[in-house]
Amino acid sequence: MRYFEDMEPGTITHSPRSYKVTREEVIDFASKYDPQPFHLDDEAAKQTFFGRLSASGWHTAAMTMRLMVETMQDGEPQAGLGSPGIDELKWIKPVYPGDEIRIEMEMISKRRMKSRPDMGLTRSENRVYNQHNELVMRFIGNGLIKVRDPEAPIEDEPAA
Amino acid sequence: MRYFEDMEPGTITHSPRSYKVTREEVIDFASKYDPQPFHLDDEAAKQTFFGRLSASGWHTAAMTMRLMVETMQDGEPQAGLGSPGIDELKWIKPVYPGDEIRIEMEMISKRRMKSRPDMGLTRSENRVYNQHNELVMRFIGNGLIKVRDPEAPIEDEPAA
C-alpha cells in the first residue's frame, strides 16, 4: 500500500490506456446531464464554434476520472481517502466522437494536515491529451491520503 | 435572448426543480466513470468515512450541470457560448442515494473581453444543497456570452 510518505512531488504517471470517445456515449451523457443542443445534435453544433458534435466538458471530466482510477489502480494501491475538490479546471479544446484521450498526472506538492496528523493533502496537475497530443483539458486535483506513521512530527512545509 | 449586457452581478437564480438521486444511477455512473469500491459497494463504503454508498463527486457535478441547464432554459434563453472552465470546486458533504439536490447560481462578476469585443466573461458561484438544506458542493463557473452591441466601448472593469 502506498501512503502519504511514499508520494514524491515531481512524479508523473501516465494512464495505462487511452479512452475511445464514441458518438453514442457523447449523446447518452449529454441527454442525461448536459442537454444543450451542441452536445446532442449535428446541425445545432455546426452553428457554434465547436463546428461539430462535441462531448460535454463534464463528460470529458468523467472519462478523465475513469482514466485516473485506472492509473491509480494500475500500480500499488494507494491509501486514498477521497478528494476535497479541484482547482483551475480548463476546457482547452473540444473533445469529439472518435477522439482517444489519455492522461498525465503530475504530483505537484504535498503537506501533512495539522488538524489530522493521520492524513495528508496532495495536489496534482492532471492533463488530458487527445490522439494528436493536443492538451484538451487540465485541472489541479486535491487528494486526501493516509499517513503511514501519524506519530512522526509534522514538518513545516510550505502550504500546498 | 439575454446577452452580456443583461447580466446583473448579484443576481441569484434557483433551479426550477430538485434532482432525485437514485441508487441505480449512482452505481451506473460509478461503474462507468469512477469505479472505486465506496461508490459501488455497500460493504466497502461502510469502511470509509462516507459511511455508506455515496455518489461520485463527478456524478454530483454532472447532476448539477443538468440542473444548471434547466435553470438557464427556464427563463429567457441566454446567448451562451460555452464555458472555458471552473475554479475552486469543493465537495463538502457526501451525496447519498435518496437525496434530492437543488442549486443556486449567483452571478458574481462580468467583464468584456478586450481581445474579442463581441464576447464577455461571467463568473458565477454555483451552490448545491441537499433536502436538508446542507451545502454539499460549490464551485465558481466561468462562462462566455455574446455581447449584444460589440461596438460599445469596453469600460475598464476590475478583472473578473
Image (cartoon, coloured by chain):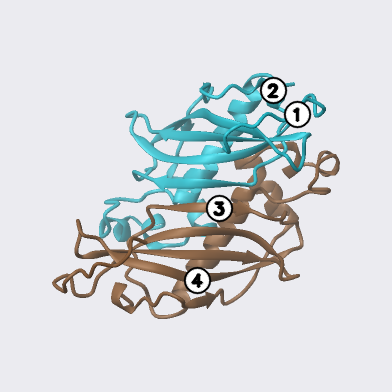
Chain colours: A brown, B cyan
The residue under label 4 is A106
Q: Secondary structure at mark 2?
A: helix
In this picture, residue A24 sits left or right of residue B17: right
The residue under label 1 is B147
* C-alpha distance separating marks 2 and 1: 7 Å
Tell which subunit mark 2 falls on.
B
The image position of residue B116, as x and y in percent, is: 77, 40
Q: Quadrant of residue A107?
A: bottom left
Q: Amino acid at mark 4?
A: Glu
- What residue do we see at 75% from left, 56% from top? A96
* C-alpha distance separating marks 3 and 4: 15 Å
The residue under label 2 is B5
The image position of residue B60, as x and y in percent, is: 47, 44
Q: Secondary structure at mark 3?
A: strand
Which quadrant of the figure contains the C terminus of chain B?
Answer: top right
Please say if the residues under marks 1 and 4 sit with CB atoms less than 8 Å apart: no
Q: Same chain, marks 3 and 4?
A: yes
Q: Amino acid at mark 1?
A: Val
The residue under label 3 is A89
Q: Secondary structure at mark 1?
A: loop
Tell which subunit mark 3 falls on.
A
Visible in this render: residue B25?
no
- What residue do we see at 57% from left, 55% from top? A61
Earlier residue among tags 2 and 1: 2
Mark 1 surroundings: few (<14), some (14-19) or many (≥20) residues within 10 A: many
